[in-house]
Image: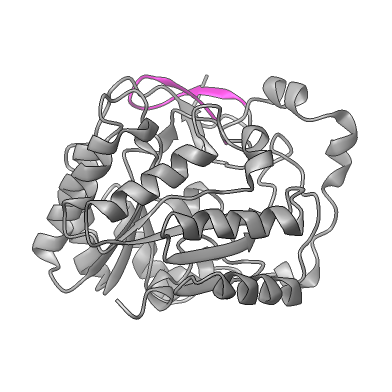
Amino acid sequence: MSDSASSGEKYRTRHGFTAIRDGISASHARKLIPTADCDATTRKPPWLRVELPHGPKYRNVQSSVVENSLHTVCAESHCPNIGECWSNGTATLMLLGSVCTRACRFCAVDTGNPKGWLDHDEPQNCARAVALMNLRYVVLTSVDRDDLEDGGAAHYAACILAIHDQNPSTTIEALTPDFRGDFAAVEVVVSTPVKVFAQNLETVERLTSRVRDPRAGYDQTLRVLAHAKSVSEVRTKSSLMLGLGETDEEIRQAFEDLRSHDVDFLTLGQYLRPTKNHLPVSRWVRPDEFEDYRQTALNFGFQDVAAGPLVRSSYRADRLSAQL
C-alpha cells in the first residue's frame, strides 16, 4: 500500500493508518451500483466547462495552503470551481485532516479511521493562512471524525478562535459534520465568533440512504441546523445536489423542510460523479431549470439562494451572506 494508490485502492497515510483513495473502494462500488448504471457517465454539457486554474492569486492561495500544511475542500473534493475561487483569492479550508470516517457515495474525499490523530498546529496554521491570503470571509469545513468522542468539535472551535484572534475583521462560516446529532458538540462550535453555521442536507429524503453514509440522516441534519439556530445568533445554511434522481415534488419538500427548521440560506448545484466508483449522474440540470428552482426556493422564504450547475455549498459564500 502506498500514498500513490489509484482511485478505490487502499494506501497507508504518513500518519500510519489505512485509507481508501477517493472514498469508495472498487469492490464496494460494484455492489452498490448496478452494472446498467455504469453507462450513465455521458459527455458533460457545455455549460459545465470551466477554465483551468491560473493566475498569480491562484498561485498565492496554492502556496499558502501548501506552506501551512493545510487541506482544502477545493482540492480534496475535486471542486470544479477551484480555478475561479482561488484566482479570486478565496479558499475553503478543510479541518481535521484529509481522511473521513464516512463514505458518502457522492464524495471523493479519502475514507479511513484516523484513530484519534489530530494536527495540533492546525488552528495557528489556519489563522496564519487566512492572514496571508487577506481573506475577509473564510469558510471552514471538515471531514467527519467519528473516531473522536466529540466528533472534532473542540478542535473546530479552536480553529475558529485562532482565526478570529488574528483576523478579527474576517467573517467566519463553519460547514460542519453532523457530530452524530450530538447537540453538545454543536453548541461548542456555535459558542465561538462564527457567523454562519452550515450543514448540508445533500439530497432529498428518499435518496438519503442511497447517497449518504448510513451514519448520516435527513432528519438528523435538520435537527442539527435547528438546534444551532436555537442556542445562538448564527445564520444557518444548507445545500442540495441535483441530478441524482430526485423529483420536483421532492425538491420542493426539501425546501419546505429546511424552512420549517428556520434555515436562512440555500445553495443548489449539479451533482458531478467524481470517479466511476461513485453514484452515476441521473440527469444534467439546465441553467434555466436552476433559475426556476432558485425562484421557487426564494418563495419558500429563504433569505438568499445561490443556484447553478457549478454552485457548491461554499461557492462565493461571501456574496450569498453579504447581508451579514
**Total number of numbered discs in the rendering:** 0
x 23%, y 36%: residue: 184
Hey, which quadrant is residue 170 in on the image? bottom left
Q: Which residue is the extreme one toward the front?
A: 260
Residue 258 in the image: state x and y as whole percent.
50, 56
Which one is in front, 73 or 221? Answer: 221
x 63%, y 55%: residue: 253
x 66%, y 60%: residue: 252
Q: Is residue 42 left or right of residue 188?
A: right
Image quadrant in which the C terminus is located = bottom left
x 67%, y 34%: residue: 210
Q: Is residue 238 above or below residue 41?
A: below
Which one is in front, 83 or 54? Answer: 83
Residue 92 in the image: state x and y as whole percent.
38, 59
Q: Residue 78: in sight, yes or no?
A: yes
**Protein image colouring:** one colour
Residue 55 in the image: state x and y as whole percent.
47, 76
Hey, which quadrant is residue 218 in on the image? top right
Hey, which quadrant is residue 299 in on the image? bottom right
Which one is in front, 213 or 52? Answer: 213
Residue 53 in the image: state x and y as whole percent.
54, 68
Q: Which residues are magenta?
A: 9-22
Is residue 18 rendered magenta in the image? yes
Is residue 271 rendered magenta in the image? no
Q: Is residue 142 left or right of residue 24?
A: left
Q: Residue 54: in sight, yes or no?
A: no
